[in-house]
Image (tube, rainbow, N blue to C red):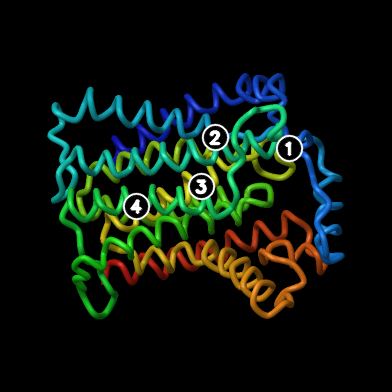
Amino acid sequence: MHIYLGFSLIAFGITAGLFVPFINFLFKMKFTRGSEQHEVRKNAPDAFYKIRELQSQKPMLVTGGGILVAAVVLVMFTGLFLALGPKLGWVGGYQPLWVELAALGVTFIGFGILGFYDDVIKIFGYAKTGFFGLRMRHKLLLQIVLGTITALLLWQGLGIDLINVPLVGMVHLGWWYLPFAAFLIVGFANAFDITDGLDGLSCGLLMICLVAFWLISARALDHVLTVFIAVWLGSLLAYLYFNTYPARIMLGNVGGLAFGATLAVVGLLSGKMVAMMIVAGVFLAEGTSSLLQLFSKKFMKKRIFPIAPFHHWLQLVGWEEPKIVARAWMVGLVLAIFGVWLAVL
């Protein structure tokens, strides 16, 4: 385990050393939240504008922290395996090494590129970029395509078609694994992205989830997953230093989509997806609150909640941002302990 802790520390040092100049670079590029074009929404409730007013009281923040974290993780993770993998005899658990690497890389890069495109459109607008603006349904379709590609790598490339259900055992899904995995990857991507709305909220919860699955992957002797999580944790810790309240930088959709989708792949690779759904319960609750709100407005013509996701409702009733984040971390920690306990039964 000491070698993995070393990788985590190295990733932390590299990312921490790069973040200040990277933040300055993003400011120069005007990659800031304050430069976004906020439209006036028709029939928006008062709660929507109250939350917007709270957000406008914060100093201008740069967005795009996920770009640096993703770059450090991918470069360092790939370098470690090319340089040390053959010497140390690492293998991907009981799975082919390079296919497992491809599943993680395709998800991380593919969803990251889609998120970056979304960030550029939101910050600079269609007129300035000259890019073709995608509607929500188009972006969802692209996410489904990316999720299906990763699911195919898991199902066909690695031969995974089962999940471990606590107290029941292994359940083989057959070809149903393909839509099941794709749905979870897309769902986690959006649930994480939705949660990334308060300083330190999503990143702190993500680190709790990753520590839980670091223990699970190390126990299963899956070196690919263990090294990947170790590097990811170290880089995220450096980001969290700059993202805790009051934040200097946000993930942006680059990290929002890529990190959520990859978290689902971590759960699928380990075969402990049920445990992952418990460990990542706060993300799922946040995503579900927004999904219910969307369906109620479309089909019932009314809102179930004054505002969604749930963390904005807590702001609306008077909870201060650090209080919401700290208590969400506590809930996440309890869920992580419970999920790991179930995973090792």
The alpha-carbon separation of the residues under discs 1 and 2 comes to 21 Å
Residue 46: x percent and y percent? Answer: 87, 65
Which is more N-terminal, label 4 or label 3?
A: 3
Q: Secondary structure at mark 2?
A: helix
Q: Residue at x 51, y 28 (%)?
A: 15
Q: Residues within 10 Å of mark 3 (few under 14, many from 20)?
A: many
C-alpha gap between disc 3 and disc 2: 19 Å
Rendered residue at 73%/75% (across/down): 303
Query: Is the C-beta separation of discs 4 and 1 under 8 Å?
Result: no
Residue 173 on image: x %, y %: 22, 70
Distance between mark 4 and mark 1 Cα atoms: 30 Å
- The residue to which callout 4 is attached is 266
Amino acid type of the residue that numbered disc 1 sits on in the rendered structure: Arg
Q: Which residue is mark 1?
A: 33
Residue drawn at the location 50% of the way across and 62% of the way down? 333
Real-space CA distance between mark 4 and mark 2, rounded to the nearest whole angstrom: 21 Å
Q: Nearer the viewer, mark 4 or mark 1?
A: 1
Secondary element at image label 4: helix
